[in-house]
Image: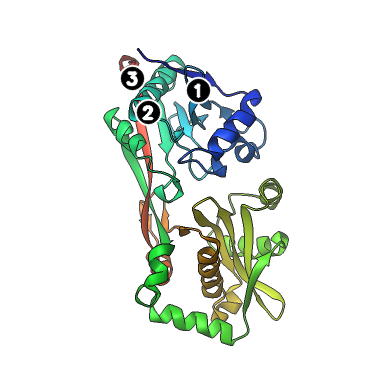
Amino acid sequence: MNQIRSVKYTKEYLGIWDSFVKNSRNGTFLNTKRFLNYHPQGKFEDLSLLFYKKNVLISVFPAALVKDKNDNNMLFSHPGSTYGGIIISNKTKLKHVDDIVKKLINFSISNVIEKIVIKLPPRIYYKYPSDEIDFILFKNNFKIRKRDLTTTIFFPNFRKNYNQLMDSSCKRAIKSAKNQGLTVQVSNDFDAYWKILTQNLKKHNTTPVHSITEIQLLKSLFPDKIQLFSAFLNGKMIGGTITFLTTTTIHTQYIAMLYEFQQFRPINAVFDFLIQYGISKGYIYLNFGVSTEEYGDKINWNLFDFKESFGARGILHELYELKINKCDKI
């Protein structure tokens, strides 16, 4: 007998939800409602769910209802974040995950949803093994529709094999930056950095995902988890990266520099600083972010080569999809 029941999220569950995510084995602060609620009210139709076994919360599913290009209803986890996923507790077992996925399918059928799309967190964010989710999605006919590739440094191995993993050209660039008087530090001057970032992205005919107002709001909500690491030359900010800090991982959300100062190698200096910072603080991974576009259809080879020169290697970031038919109800 299926003992799993689902409850649609309402604001009364905010504290329960965020506490569960904090103590989950595969969730991060990006899955909390405190983070997701920075989006303006009405931007997404929230269809997040909580799953209980009897009276014990065993999973949450951050999701929203959106339209695909054919105007079909799509349950997406999560359009307002880098990843969503089925977030589970340390005690959630394989059968529970199977029941949860079947509940999701039936919920979608009952709400005239034609497609479920789930972008799972990459495994580097997991605090404990959680591949039951991938396995059960596969068993319930979900398909991997898109794959991004992110580049990541694994600190425990990197510390032992620094000389073998980092390219000699990268080491020379770091040394050159230091010799030219570049310094790196944690900064709170998000306004100055946003001007650099906006100028960078304008060259590629794009804009930051977050506005400066949004990133400052998120910084105020998560002061210890969102940090700006900046490179300075004679007191002038010339580059940097905004990072999201999870339990296991330092993730570079935005990377930018003033191109007229490129010869000073500000990004090399910032990444070197982050490596030393991550090791000293006990993080397991440093994630430089994806170097693919359009969900993996395009590869930025130069960007991959730059990140790999530090010793970073590829980690998959996968998007699962299930097209719903009425006969799928189980």
* Residue name at image x 54 percent, y 37 percent: 21
On the image, the x and y values in percent for residue 55 come to 51, 18
Does residue 71 appear in the picture of this structure? no
How many C-alpha atoms fall within 10 Å of the one at disc 3: few (<14), some, or many (≥20)?
some
On the image, the x and y values in percent for residue 43 come to 62, 33
Quick one: which residue is furthest to the bottom in this view? 179
Count of number-bearing discs: 3
Does residue 47 appear in the picture of this structure? yes
- Element at label 1: strand
Question: The N terminus is located in which quarter?
Answer: top left
Q: Earlier in the sequence, mark 3 or mark 1?
A: 1
Q: Which mark is residue 97?
A: 2
How many C-alpha atoms fall within 10 Å of the one at disc 1: few (<14), some, or many (≥20)?
few
- Element at label 3: loop
Q: Nearer the viewer, mark 1 or mark 2?
A: 1
Q: Amino acid at mark 1?
A: Val
Q: Which mark is residue 108?
A: none
Q: Nearer the viewer, residue 254 or 124?
A: 124
Q: Nearer the viewer, mark 3 or mark 2?
A: 2
Q: Amino acid at mark 3?
A: Asn
Q: Nearer the viewer, residue 136 or 116?
A: 136
Q: Which residue is label 1 attached to? A: 56
Cβ atoms under marks 3 and 2 closer than 8 Å: no
- Element at label 2: helix
Q: Which residue is label 3 attached to? A: 325
Q: Nearer the viewer, mark 3 or mark 1?
A: 1
* Residue name at image x 52 percent, y 56 percent: 251
